[in-house]
Image (tube, helix red, strand yellow):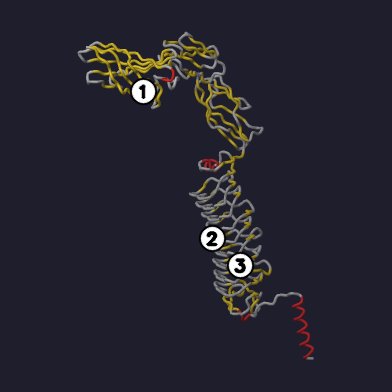
Amino acid sequence: MRKHIIGIMITLLLAIGAFGMTVSAAEEDFNYKEVNGGIEITGYRGSDRNVVIPDTIEGKPVVSIGYSAFYVRDIISVEIPATVGEIGGQAFSYCDELTKVTFRGNGLKEIKERAFASCGKLSDFAFPNTLRSVEQLAFRGCNSLHRADLSKTQITKMERAVFYDCKGLTDVSFPPGMDQIPEDTFVGCESLRNVVINGNNIKVIGESAFQFCKSLSSFTIPSTVIKIESYAFDSTNSLTSITVPASVKSIGYAAFNSSSLKTVYCEYGSYAYNYFKKMYGVKVVASGTYLKKNKLTIYVGEKQTLALVNRQNGTTFSSSNKKVVSVSSKGVIKGLKKGTATITAKNGNTVSKCKVTVKALNLNYKKATVTAGFQLKLKLAGATKVKWSSSDNSVATVSKKGVVKANHPGKVTITAKSKGKKYTCKVTVAANEKVFKTYGTSYQQYPSDKIYVELSKVYKEGDHFAAELTVSNNTYFRMKSIATLDIRIYANGNLILTKDVRDMAAEVPAHSRQIIRVEFTGSEVKKSKVDLRNTGITSSLSNGKTWMTY
């Protein structure tokens, strides 16, 4: 009979193995204590590295894994029953070889502080649907954990830095019950690329939440978020684009510091729109229909169609001062009189404004002086059709485009006529010359200190350039001629006229002064188009000698 019983037991054990049923570790492998509701495991003294926690010990359910219960233990995997509702603080911290944590059913509700911190090889962790709370630093430094799918959990409370420095984490999916992404949650998660936020409850992205997430290239902030705290996306080196909803009303200090942000998608006029518009190097792509310009200048009588971005039907326009600017239903504005008015465009929830300044028609010059041989461009600002005329074409002419050509010294009135009104500019045509009023501006001392030759004037006469030399003879003898004299005249440092005088008559009585005219021709003229009045003219006189008579 005994042999039959043993045979039945062996057969039963073989059957259990054949069907893959789990065999829990022996009760004596655990340290435990009785707590309210069942048993809490406080330690492990078994040798099996693949730990299976039993459903019951001494006939009572195992309801929790206590503080530091498996701290620094050399285990590879652990299987936790559905009876366990809480994993205590540092329960599995520094289990360097732990790779897999599985659950026999859903029952876990809380993961306490640092429960799996620094489990560097932990790669497989299936979060139970019943999970409601995860405390700070729970998975800190779990570098082999690639995916954290929290989407089906009931988490409503998550403390700071839960996934701090999980360098291998690439994908995260948040549950619908959370109202914030806590501070420091993903600091140093340098492989994080995909973040999915389920539900419509997230209101705050906490301080430094995604700091140093170097692989995060894009991010869509949920439409319920109202606050992005300081350093939230600091040093996200790959983050080039982000979508920010109109719900955001606050962005903290350096929230996007040291990111590679290039494009921001947001709603026109929102807090985010105004915030990122001030950020250098960032392109803001705004949604909604809005006015392309926020300020504009037109002239009395001028019409202009306001440009809209993302133009859609249903846009309405209004003017704050209809006596200054009118606006049609199609956004066509017209300047009525000098002043300012604000045009408002509305489309759905998007409101945009443009300040319009209306100016009277205005001639760009009321009076001007032009050097003979040169031109002046007149423009009647705001006018589309203008008729131009000159009071004296011999002094100056004006083209159909308002270009005034100065002919001869004198005075003339140029008139612009538009819509029955006249606008005038008084033009003085001045000779093309430079007069040196103070002797000694340019001079050369001759054989004795009593004879001087000075450049007193350079001018253009018709098509020729000429200069006047003032010769001062302070001797008792009559001066007969200038034997040698090298003349160089410059405009803004560039040589324009040159002449080498040889044996030029210069009859200057004793103790008197005489004007001697010198003309420049041919190769002596280095530049023929020079406005002598409005150019810096300098000169040099050298190698001078004179002939005297007694």
Vertical position of residue 55 compared to residue 507: above or below: below
Q: Based on the displayed image, in which of its 4 quarters is residue 50 positioned?
A: bottom right
Circle 1: element type? strand
Q: How many marks overall? A: 3
Mark 2 residue type: Ala
Q: Based on the displayed image, in which of its 4 quarters is residue 13 positioned?
A: bottom right
Classify 10 Å Cα crowding around label 3: few (below 14), some (14-19), many (20 and above): many
Question: Is tag 1's residue or tag 3's residue first in the polypeptide sequence?
Answer: 3
Pinpoint residue 399: horizontal percent, then vertical percent. Answer: 53, 14
User: Which residue is at a point 59% across and 41% down the rendered structure image?
Assistant: 285
Residue identified by numbered label 1: 488
Classify 10 Å Cα crowding around label 1: few (below 14), some (14-19), many (20 and above): some
Mark 1 residue type: Arg
In front: mark 2 or mark 3? 3
Pinpoint residue 421: horizontal percent, then vertical percent. Answer: 52, 12
Name the foreground residue: 403 vs 257.
403
Tag on residue 122? 3
Classify 10 Å Cα crowding around label 2: few (below 14), some (14-19), many (20 and above): many
In front: mark 2 or mark 1? 1
Name the foreground residue: 415 vs 401.
401
Pinpoint residue 221: horizontal percent, then vertical percent. Answer: 59, 49
Question: Is tag 2's residue or tag 3's residue first in the polypeptide sequence?
Answer: 3
Question: Is tag 2's residue or tag 1's residue first in the polypeptide sequence?
Answer: 2
